[in-house]
Image (spheres, rainbow, N blue to C red):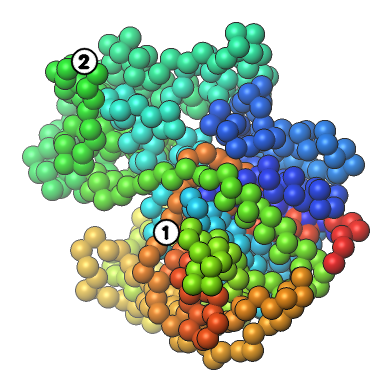
Amino acid sequence: MGAAVGAAAPELAQAVSQARLLKNLVLTGFSSIYVIDLDTIDVSNLNRQFLFQKKHVGRSKSQVAKESVLQFCPEANIIAYHDSIMNPDYNVEFFRQFTLVMNALDNRAARNHVNRMCLAADIPLIESGTAGYLGQVTVIKKGVTECYECQPKPTQKTFPGCTIRNTPSEPIHCIVWAKYLFNQLFGEEDADQEVSPDRADPEAAWEPAEAEARALASNEDGEIKRVSTKQWAKSTGYDPVKLFTKNFCGTYKYSCSSFFFSFFPKEQNKSDQQNESSAMLKDQQVLNVRSYADLFSKSVKTLSLHLAEKADGEALIWDKDDPSAMDFVTSAANLRMHVFGMNMKSRFDIKSMAGNIIPAIATTNAVIAGLIVLEGLKILSGKIDQCRTIFLNKQPNPRKKLLVPCALDPPNPNCYVCASKPEVTVKLNTHKVTVLTLQDKILKEKFAMVAPDVQIDDGKGTILISSEEGETEANNHRKLSDFGIRNGTRLQADDFLQDYTLLINVLHSEDLEKDVEFEVVGDAPERIGPKPSEPTPKNISNGSDDGAQPSTSTAPEQDDVVIVDSEDEGTSSNADDVENKSRKRKLEKGCECVGAKRVRNLLLPLDKVIHVMSYCNSTLSWDVKNVQN
């Protein structure tokens, strides 16, 4: 059998430690494993990742994990990829070769994607995640259990540190990074928030050979020599051009020649002068790259003057109501979005967004990694009916248990992903919404499609959006009404990579709230009514009654927990969306799940195991031989 293991995103926002999961799988008897991870080893990983050492800093996590495991288990067949799990090469056929998939992802987009790929391939998926002292493991099986997207997810508020530093995939990642940069330059320095390490540090290297050379040099000196970002910035006199080059160019091998002119404007654009005349208009506008580069330069100069006025040892404190601080974060975040190919955001949007970092707890990761393998063994033994969603709580429940098992919920018939005929209704103004908005904000951001194709259900099969580059680009800035789309029009959206089709019913409305471009009616998928109780399943793996009963889910969840792994841990279950909305409570007598939080973005696959790690997306695949029931 094969097994694929991957990093899960946070519901419990952190990913389970890759090292612990990989070690558990190998020592349990999995002999064929595929690991996919886009991330590289960071100094901050070394305190919990026992497969990594200082000499490995800057190298691929998946490759080093493979090398380290083979030292104590040379018979294991591990194939490591330094790549993103969302690469089109990892299609449905790729997933079908595995018996089991395990997620260790740190962002919702990747989790949604792996969820859909496993549904399309009909391969069991184990989701898992941690959030500080909290943890969760659950199993997803097409037609048997809820999928990852069966319940609505809260907006993510915290994110793994490795994603923020190395592989941002969403605007919020760049915003949190910009706040970190503010603290490193002008505020209280925090080693866990380092965003621009000294260039002598092997962390800063992109090339493995260069990283190894730097690491070797540091070993000769006994330690890695560091210069803090603030010290370096002071040594340059807070030169905006040098700060720009260090943070937006050299570190990311990005050509910045097109940016440099921004720091030496010959004259101010008239359009910029007009924008400045209206604070409200300016705050809600998305400026161009040159404008944000200018804003970055001006804010750095202003903040450095404010810092100079402080007494020695004092620092600035970021405040969203401080214009200079807000200018800095707005400009830095948007420049980083541009570097990583994301759509930039207005000052208004950025001001409303924030993120927190919650450190990963080694013990939590160890417990969850063990539970992942136990659930995997049940699947491989043909006992999926004995699988449970297991919650790790910070405090014992009324039965004095920290580990609380709950029966798996059946699929939500209203789910727009795993229902037999996925369908949603979207309310929007067809006279204002453009084809590009439909593609980027509705299909890709809201419904997590990767490469959508859209046709109008008008009897003619009119193609509105094509995933083929340039084929329908001319449609991008046209309004939906230009194509005859009106109230009641049906659109068919297909993502062939995910083998996923979604029917969209258009509900035209001119009464949407200000700044709201669209709404999904019912916030689909919507939690359905309470389920009738069922007999408590007996005899889990050890033959004892675990007391688990189907969750009633009668009340909506109120405590949304999203935790971010300050470090990128391959196996740390990153619950991108610690969805406490799916919290399970048992109302029947003897219920084990009272107070248990359902973290829905944690999953890891075993069997043919694909291990997908942090947004560096790592995926592992293993063949399991001679596994005892």
Given residues 472 and 57, the one toward you in this image is: 57
Q: Residue furthest front?
A: 400
Q: Residue 154: percent from the left, percent from the top?
A: 40, 63
Q: Give the mark nearest the N terminus, 2 or 1.
A: 2
Q: Is residue 47 above or below residue 448?
A: above
Quarter of the image where one finds residue 497: bottom right
Residue 105 visible at all: no
Q: How many C-alpha atoms fall within 10 Å of the one at disc 2: few (<14), some, or many (≥20)? A: few
Quarter of the image where one finds residue 209: top right
Q: Residue 296: percent from the left, percent from the top?
A: 27, 28
Which quadrant would the N terminus be assigned to in this image?
Answer: bottom right
Q: Is residue 163 above or below residue 324?
A: below
Asked which secondary structure carries label 1, the reply is loop
* Residue that appears at 35% across and 41% down: 175
Asked which secondary structure carries label 2, the reply is loop
Q: How many C-alpha atoms fall within 10 Å of the one at disc 1: few (<14), some, or many (≥20)? A: many
Q: Residue 588: percent from the left, percent from the top?
A: 51, 86
Quarter of the image where one finds residue 602: bottom right
Given residues 115 and 273, the one toward you in this image is: 115
* Residue that appears at 69% across and 55% down: 370
Badge 2 is on which residue?
312
The residue type indicated by label 2 comes to Asp
Badge 1 is on which residue?
561
